Amino acid sequence: MSIEVKNLVKKFGDRKVIDNISFKVNDKETLAVVGFSGSGKSTVLKLICGLISKDEGEIITSPGDIAMVFQYSALFDSINVADNISFALRERRDLRKKYTEEQIKDIVEQKLELVGLKGIEKLFPSELSGGMQKRVSFARAIVTEPKSILYDEPTAGLDPISSTLIEDYIVRLKEETNAASIVVTHQMSTITRTADRVIMLYNGKIVFEGTPEEMLRQDNEYTKQFVTASLDGPMKMMEGNNDE
Amino acid sequence: MGMLHKYYKQSATYKVFIALIDILTDFLDTLGKITQNGICVIKSLLKGHIDFKELIYQCSRFGVSSLPITLTIVGMTSVIVTSQVALEMVKQGGGNYIGMMMSILIIREVAVIMSGFAIISMIGSSLASELATMRVTEQIDAIEVLKVNSVEYLFVPRVLSGILMMPFITLIAAAVGIIAGAITADLFAGLNYRAYFDSAWLGIYMKDLWVSLLKAVFFGGTIALISCSCGYFASGGAKGVGLATTKAVVWSFVAIVIWDMIFAIAFFF
């Protein structure tokens, strides 16, 4: 087990954004979390990586780092690609003196090679395309060899080809790092190409749990509405439109 | 009773009361956050957790980039004051006191407070908008996820640069202010430089100088701390960045005036 969530509850004011959800993600497994905008998907990721605090429930993770790839990459725009990737190695108290400059340079090169972007160390984030920024953020996320990787809408705002490339890298990073991964996404191709299992959230509750194939079979009213992008179904946009 | 309660809730008094409660809550919330960050900065400084590379960059940003506008504002203020009083003082036989008056005025108040205002508009607003942008683009979240203490990483070099650079800026501004006064007194009242500087020298007291530099230390640290805090806790996209910047400027202005009053009472009352 790498990530286990038990009876998790998160409230913003009086509103339950996450309402008593439980799931597990094992090592070398990718879980896709899907749902309409505002269904609480990103909140789940922020709770797991500790950016916001839970109100009730338990989050158990294996010892080791949790990495997160943000929706819009969140690269530090005042420093170059190499400094972005090596940020944790240079600034984290427990890692600061662990590596020499030469070692850091090698690690940066190695991580950039892993995401297919060798030789862009000196460029600044503003000089990169959206897809490249996303891949640099992948490299930054895996620099500390994390045990779990969280992806917040990794293909948002990308063209179909860049999306495919990003999906391939999600699979590749899972194989290379053996990490447990959670991918929050709206995109069907990301679900089918990267996920081993899927959970669907609606109004903070899990309304479907299964494999991508089971999701596509549309036996569940919720997944049927999601897959067919229909306005008719149990999910009402206004009801589910909570802030994440 | 229920109806009465409903009408009361619609009344202007109730709405004003609720608005005042909101303002007070926001004020206390901001003050609490600034204090919390201030304590964290002090702890980090005491532990010696200082990123010197970043500190040098922030010092150059704080000092060098703000110096032209600061010197212009202090110089202009000196010209405005001297041009209005010099001729009158010469007419009343007090020409020999112009330099003294200007040096006391500039060292005690004008240099430090005008530098503070210039720094708020140049650096404070820039710090607040920078950190607010980092917040709304999730860069601060990324720092936290990478297990780096974001307050220490972002605040310590910025606040320390304010503390270190503000006294230097104030000293240079004071010198420029006194020189600008001399040129103005010569042009407007025909007072020669020697008479002005002889008089100005008599008005320079060590106590004034030290108090002014101590004030500068407090002003610099306060401006940086407030500006960083307002940016750090921003939320809600472009509007949030704008609101954070406005809040930083307003709070910094009020804070340095309060500091100035405290110093005036403590040292000159």
Image (cartoon, coloured by chain):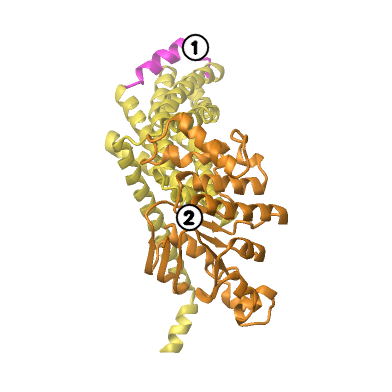
Chain colours: A orange, B yellow
A114, above or below A4, in the image: above
Q: Is residue B169 magenta?
A: no
User: Circle 2 marks a residue in which chain?
Assistant: A
Image location of residue B81, percent across then percent down: 50, 29
Quadrant in the rendering for residue B259: top left
Three-letter amino acid code at disc 1?
Answer: Asn
Q: Residue at x 42, y 58 (%)?
A: A50
Q: Is residue A97 left or right of residue B119?
A: left
Looking at the figure, which quarter contains the C terminus of chain B? top left
Residue named by callout 2: A179
Report the front residue among B158 and B24: B158
Disc 2 element: loop
Q: Residue at x 56, y 63 (%)?
A: A184
For the stretch drawn in magenta, the main secondary structure is helix
Q: Residue at x 39, y 64 (%)?
A: A59
Residue A114, can we see it? yes
Q: Residues within 10 Å of mark 1 (few under 14, many from 20)?
A: some
Looking at the figure, which quarter contains the N terminus of chain B? bottom left
Q: Is residue B200 magenta?
A: yes
Residue placed furthest toward the top: B194
Image location of residue A220, percent across then percent down: 60, 81
Give the magenta-colored segment's residue range: B189-205
B194, above or below B66, in the image: above
Residue named by callout 1: B192
